[in-house]
Structures are given as C-alpha cells and as structure tokens.
Image: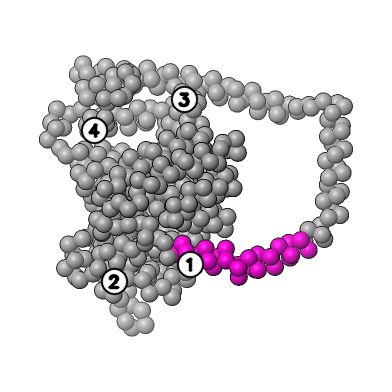
Amino acid sequence: MSAPLAYLRLVKAGFVLAREGVFSLLPRDDAPLAVRFGLWCADRIAQKNIDNKSKGDRLNAALNRLGPSYIKLGQFLATRPDIVGPDISEGLGKLRDDVPPFPDATARQIISSNLNRTIDVLYSTFSAPVAAASIAQVHRATIVDADTEKAVAVKVLRPDVRVRFQKDLESFYAAARLVQTLDPSTRRLRPVAVVDTLARSVTMEMDLRIEAAALSEMAEIAKDDPLFVVPSIDWDRTGRDVLTIDWIDGLKMADLDGLEKAGHDKSALAKNLIQIFLRHALNHGFFHADMHQGNMFVDAQSRIVAIDFGIMGRIGPKERKFLAEILYGFIKRDYLRIAEVHFEAGYVPATQSVADFAQALRAVGEPIHGQSAQDISMAKLLGLLFEITELFDMETRTELLMLQKTMVVVEGVSRSLDSNFDMWSAAEPVLRDWLTDNLGPGAKLEQAASSLSSIGRLLNELPQLADRAAHASQALDDMSLAGLRLDDASLARLAHYQARENRTSRIALVVMALSAAAVALAYVF
C-alpha cells in the first residue's frame, strides 16, 4: 500500500499548493494547452482572499503546511532573490528559523530519554526554545565546567520528524518514477538517483551524533583558519536526538542592518564566504552543504561562524581537479579547455563534439564577463545551462549534486551581503593557488612517485591477474558453445520488474483520475 499512499500524498501536496495560490505564480503564456488548463483548474481551488497575500507569504504558508522536506526546499530558494524574485525570497526567508516550536516539555523528555539523566542534572539552566527550524529547535542552557559556568546551545530533534521525512521521501520517489514513466526524456536527469542522494543526506541528518562527528571533522580542518570557526561539542551531552555545543555570540548573516551597525565589512564577508567554501571543497573534499543565512553567524572579530552541520558534502580528488579547472577556465575564458575537462570527466557523452560544446559554453560565459552582479540574470543563466545539458544529452551527476546546490546557495548569500559581488574575481586566487599546488611541477613529481609505487604493486599482482584472465577466457568459450542461460532466480526478477512497470503505469492513470476528481470537487464546492 505504500506506493498508492505516496501518490495520494502527491495529490495532497498539489492541492495544498493550489489552495495557497502557489500555481498562480507560474507563467502560462508559452505553456502547452494541457498545462494552461491545469493552472486554470488550480486557480479555481485557490482561496478567495489569496490576492491579498504576497507571493512569498503564499509559498511560505504552503511549504509550512507540507512539512520539513518542503521547508528545506524553501530555505534553498530563499537564498536566491535573483532567481525567484525579492518578494518570494523575503517570504521564504521566514522559513529559516521562524517555524513554530514544539512544546518545551517534549524537548525535556527527549533529552532525558536520550542522555539517561534529568535536565536538572545535565544543565544548570535550560530556557524555552530560542529558535525553531524544520528539523529541530534550539534551547539556551548553561553548564558548570571546572567550576566555571558557560552558555551552551542545545539542539533537539523534532519528535515526529523521521516519520514525516520518510513519508515525504516515499512521495518524492513516487514522483520521480512517475516522471520517468510519463516522460522518458527525463531519464537523463536521473530523478530517482537524485532522490537517492537526498535520502542518504536526510538519513544522516536525522542522527545528531553524525552531525557532531561532522562538526568535529570540520573543526580540525578550520583550526588554523583566521576567518572561519566552528563551536566546540559537548560529547557528554550529545546523543541521537540531542546535540550540545558552545553558545555562539554573534550576528546572523541575514541581519544586514545589524552587521552594518556593528562595523562589519559586508563586501569582505561575501568574499570570505565563497573563498572558505572553495578551500574546504578543493583542499579537503569536505564542505558544509547547508550554508544559508540562518546557519551563518559573524562574531565580534568578523569571523564567520557556522552551525548546523547536518548536511555535509564530499567530493573525491578527481572531482576536485575538474571543479578547479572548470571554474578557472570560466575566469580565463578558456572555453575549449572547459569543454575538454567535461569530456575527460565523462560529463558529456563521447559521441558529442568538443568544439560544439565549447561554443555552447561560450554562450554561457561571455554574457557574464564584465557585467555587474545586478545586470546578470541568474534565472536566465541557469535556464541556458539546462538547455545546454539537454542539447548535449548530459546526465545528472549525483556525486556533484551537493556541490552544485551549495555553490548556488553560497553565491546567493554573498550577493545578499554585497549587491556588486563578483564570484569570479573572489574565487580566482583560491583556484589559482590550488591549481599551482596540485597541477604544477612539484605536484607532478609527487604524482610520478605515486605512479611508480602503483606500478610496483601491479607487478606483484600480475600472476593473480593472469590466472583470473585465463578463467574469464574459459568461461567466455563455454558460453559461446552452450549459449547464455538464465537461472530461475534471474527469470523471476525479470518477471517482477515487468510487473512493476505495468503496475506503475496503471497507478499513474489512477493518480491522474484522482487529481481530476479532486479538482472537480473543489470547483463544485
């Protein structure tokens, strides 16, 4: 029953969005007839007084009703007013930490259950919630450490959040499979694999011990960084649903007026933020993947202080190299090299033309060079990039999803700090230094030494490799004489897969019928 329920939840989500007037925000002039009809039906469902609400407030209300996964989406969109518009961004900005809290008594019960001690034993004082988000809420408390009382922040996971996220994920999987079934051209976007990536991230975010470990790892990386700090962890007061860290005295990056009154250089903060992110991603392959304004503070020394390490990103050495070369290529306007890197990485099918792809990249890069931030339409730029990926049959790279999403968010936050922010000039010194250190003469000598070591290991393994090759050759000879045979288990799996495909198609028809019925009933009543 989970699949039908997931589709019904999708119908409910569509109804909530329609009821709050969200679909009325979508352009419809160039939309296909079927889409225009669907939007007309959605307008009939919308509340009567919806025109009195701003675009941002409509989205805010809908996403709050739909739950934590949708709130996460809203937080992401809130960082890009240049894409969604300033009014929508302002409304969604309230989702960062203005989510209604759950009862203080419930939080105390969760903490005591997790840590097997009462609140009075754990903390000298314990406040009501000071901030609440989609995943957890935060309380201010004090503890006595070596006869010294200090303030701490206690993060407590929402009691029902795991169940709600699981239901949302089932709906997202259902939507991904439905899209692939109804429109096979979307398979290159790998929607199911995208949801897989989200599911892994959510699973880790639901365990605050994992977040504490990520915070600890980032603290080691940033220990000598004069521009970036992370709070210390109280491991004795941390469990699966509870995280205790040092209290942060600072201003949120969303508080632009407060930052200016305190004398902080917002342009320098914007530059520092993008450079910190790039250094973490390139030098360590590990980065904070939820860097919206609600998770970034500025202390009295103008250092950036990060919290909420539930969502982290990792990229391997190969991806770091390609990232650095691609970004540096855009800075130097070397579109042919950017194209070559894409082909070397396997991001573009080998059947495509390198020269043609370089030409398409020029169409992306040239309009943004020499332009001020206000004159660049990120919405149009992203639209062009999406068209290029479709033109060259490029698939979604799930290993880069967190990186791409974080880059969009970080640039958005930097732009909010400095309307003239130029990501390319800010990124250039970090990229140049990394390429010099990792692709320069010294690095090539290290790579050569590493290659010699690898060759030595290969020589030692040659006898085993030869034996395996002989066995494989014999198996191929036997197959050519006797043919390829499927065992009963393989046949059963094939039959199950075919049945599932047929069942998915039938469910899609049922969902569309239920959606039409819901629209009709809403219109009548």
Q: Nearer the viewer, residue 21 or 121?
A: 21
Amino acid carrying label 2: it is Ser
Q: Which residue is mark 1?
A: 433
Q: Name the residue: 83% across, 45% down.
A: 469
Front position in the image: 198 or 364: 364
Q: CA distance from mark 3 to mark 1?
A: 44 Å
Residues rendered magenta in the picture: 430-456
Q: CA distance from mark 1 to mark 2?
A: 24 Å
> At numbered mark 3, what does the secondary structure look like: helix, strand or loop?
loop
Instruction: Specify the amino acid type for callout 1.
Output: Asp
Earlier in the chain: of badge 3 and badge 1, it is: 3
Residue 193, percent from left and from top: 51, 39
Q: Position of residue 230 (x, y in %)?
A: 38, 68
Crowdedness near tag 2: few (<14), some (14–19) or many (≥20) residues, C-alpha within 10 Å: many
- At horizontal 54% and vertical 57% (from top left) the residue drawn is 321
Mark 4 neighbour class, 10 Å CA radius: few under 14, some 14 to 19, many 20 or more? few
Q: Which quadrant would residue 490 be assigned to in this image?
A: top right
Quadrant position of residue 16: top left
Under circle 2, the secondary element is loop
> Do the CB atoms of the residues marked 2 and 4 lie less than 8 Å apart?
no
Q: Who's the residue at 87% across and 33% down the image?
A: 477
Determine if residue 105 is in view. no
- Write down the residue under mark 3: 183
Which residue corresponds to the image point at 33% horizontal and 77% vertical from the top-left? 144
Label 4 sits on residue: 25
Crowdedness of circle 3 by 10 Å Cα count: few (<14), some, many (20+)?
few
The amino acid beneath tag 3 is Asp
Q: Quote the CA–CA distance across marks 1 and 4.
A: 44 Å
Residue placed under numbered mark 2 in the picture? 302
